[in-house]
Image (cartoon, grey):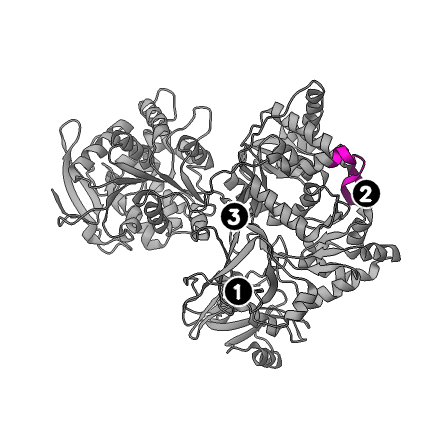
Amino acid sequence: MTSPVEQPVDGLPGLDPRWSRFLTVADASGQPRRWHVLDNGVGADGGPVEGTMLCVHGNPTWSYLWRRFLSEAPAGWRVVAVDQLGMGWSTRRAPARRLGDRIDDLGRLTDALDLQGPVVLAAHDWGGLVGLGWALEHREQLAGVVLTNTAVFQPLDQPFSALIRLARTPALRQLVCVTTPTFVQGAAALSRPSLDRDVRRALAGPYADASERAAIGDFVADVPLERHHPSRLRMEQVAEGIRDLDVPALLLWGGRDPVFTDLHLADLVDRLPHADVHRFGRASHLVTEDVPETAEIAWRWVDSRVATAGAAPSERPPAQVDRSALWAPISERATSSPDAPAVVELHDGVVSRTSFGELEQGIVDLAHGLVDLGVRRGDRVAVLVTPGLGLTTAVFACWRVGAVVVVADAGLGVRGMAHALRGARPDHVIGIPKAVAALDALRVPGRRIVAGDVSAPVGAVLRHPASVTSLTVRGGVLRTQGAVLPDLGGTDEDVAVFFTSGATGPAKGVVYRAAQLQGQVARLAGLYAGDRDDAWVAAFPLFSLYGPAMGTAAAVPDMDPTRAGTLTASALADAAAAVDGRVVFASPAALRNVVATAGALTDAQREALTRVRVLMSAGAPVPVGLLRRVQALVPNADLHTPYGMTEVLPVADITLPGIEAAGAGDGVCVGLPVPGVTVRLAPLDATGRATGELTTQAGVTGEILVDADHRKQRYDRLWATERASSRDPGHHRTGDVGHLDDEGRLWVEGRLVHVLSTPDGPLTPVGVEQRVETLPEVASAAVVGVGPAGTQQVVVVVVPVAGASARRPLAAGALAAAVREVAGVDVAAVLAVPALPTDIRHNSKIDRAAVRAWASRVLTGERAGRLA
């Protein structure tokens, strides 16, 4: 029998006191133990129960942790969140519990609760080990598992959390865990962002007095870190037992947890290889608190994986593919024209040339060396090497052995790269010395392989890792001795993880398989590369790989690859001259500096630029005025501004004459979809959400969806993001908004997350920004909405040509009046700043979220600070 709660749970944020119940259940010794549970009561009146979610907390939390899972449960689903014995509001009178006791306790409780329907286990912290122990003994009921920052095993030779180890010491355990609330308060303090005060109080509520905290100390003491710990064997049994659990599993993980780290996530993935994973890079230990939408995500997952036994809509089955097609053009050129240039690098006036014959041999030798080192098919290898020969050799050598390359370019910045690499969890890292030296501090896993010469100080830090040079030498010996590289067969598999720019949030890993990457290269070649004599000049890191992948030369200009704006006109011209470059790719930020430094060009450099046949620029909108100034420098080139993204490239294409023919419109005209690509729109509703049925009707603004065989396979360890982006079969939801015109051309109007929700309906920002930027006194502009959704007011933030004072954000009267006159919408305020914040990679995409937050502070009278 259950009875209403008799403890003070009223008034806790997010908790319905009607859920709170007590029941008494005898433990293994026959002693009655009083349990507290949160139970939404579905089925209590005899109604149907679709299924039950059983939620198990860890230490030192309680069932309150699962309140959102109860409040957001779909109709027909019962949710029971337990307070383990000695914890929460359950009895404090039970003796200390070992792991085996807690698993048995939970089983006796669930028998008493008479759980109906299929059961999905949800567990956190050490509740994961307890819950999974229960799951192994209740396989006939188990339908799925949701785990959040937990562990089922801790190797004896790997370090565990220093916080827990310290708290376990006999000298401190009583003081930290029982006598004082340090352990309780410390758990809540790990959250990022910081928890609301009332939530912290609610989590700590059952543990207000030392007499109520005994089980916290007992739980810490029962963490089985030693070989002969009483709970070690039971832990090992559970850890091995879950390897044959064949039910769906979801891992929701906070990437900044200092207790259960990515090592524990990797261990769980190894034991549950079929598990779906969503890693929240900025969340910590209490991931369900740090990311409140985890409850919604979990229930969506239950609906797609458990209730309907469905498969991920984005998971296309592996096809048969000739993986050698990725490197075949290099091998063919090495045979047919071994002395032809493949990679040309320019730095400080020195030009370094590598032929196709040399490139092929370097790739093959390094591949043999990697195999000898232990790199295996399917291993992830992060490549942190500057664009040019080192990057090209490393990437293609990895592909030759069946490894998956992880490319997080330096344009993400140090923090962005660290986040990306920790999420991708490489098995090996090939990097320049200073990058490899920083890996330990950045907590990036993987065996270290150094590319380049190592100075003595850096060498001391690195502790003699493997090197590309030594592996290549060793591989050359193995090659001459007749060693054969692995036979990769014909099955399409993962080959790369590329990262988005992080312009609208943390950079996302994008997984490609061989066929998709081959399709991307083929489409780019068909659009822009005339023949193998059309050498590429790549002023963007990843594009330096496309030339060799097409069997043509690639030149890397003298610039800082992490700062696009460092490309000068002279550096571009020198790179073009070095390979007789005919195809150029450069970001808008790079082109701005090229135009700004064109006055320094010599006659010979100008001549080299006249031989350019195609120039591409992408990554952000490219102003027509900038393109016209670039055209003057490359008078014989077709200027293209292809539209695409890390997830699918290219999508559409347009030339400068095409842009001029399209004229002004609401957004940026990016042209017609390229062959093999279909674009559809999901119309916006009154609130600015893309909820409408897919359409190709002209003039309808909505989220842009792309149907193309060369789109990504999936996002990496971002289950919820992947499901949202691929919920329309065969399509990728881009997160961009736009429309098609009567001629089928695509116009991009901004990002979905930046759509303003005004009293008059949704408003996309780019069209307004373009109209404001036609003013001669405005260098650039950003349009944001300030206020609650549905009543947002339009605010225009401009960078005046004449400059602006960071201390006086309100625009001058004449400028504000001019902006309002051309905007085409009612403008609540015009603010002026010296510069707008942009992304690191392209230095072009405006961070409108930062602009909106800053504008809100200005207009509410708060201290706004500097914007950029």
x then y, percent, for residue 765: 53, 68
Q: What residue type is labelled 2?
A: Val
Q: Which amino acid does label 3 sit on?
A: Lys
Q: Determine the CA span between mark 3 and mark 2.
A: 35 Å
- Taking the magenta stretch, the answer to whether it contains residue 350 is yes
Q: Is disc 1 in contact with disc 2, using a CB cutoff of under 8 Å?
A: no
x then y, percent, for residue 65: 31, 46
Q: Earlier in the sequence, mark 3 or mark 2?
A: 2
Q: Determine the CA span between mark 3 and mark 1.
A: 22 Å
Residues 376 and 293: in front is 376
Residues 856 and 334: in front is 334
Q: Give the range drawn in magenta.
A: 333-354
Q: Can residue 95 be seen in this view?
A: yes
Residue with the mark numbered 2: 351
Residue with the mark numbered 1: 738
Circle 3: element type: loop
Residue with the mark numbered 3: 508
Residues 804 and 724: in front is 724
How crowded pointer 1 is (Cα within 10 Å; few <14, some 14-19, many 20+) is rated as: many
Q: In this view, does 866 lie to the left or right of 168?
A: right
Foreground: disc 3 or disc 1 = 1
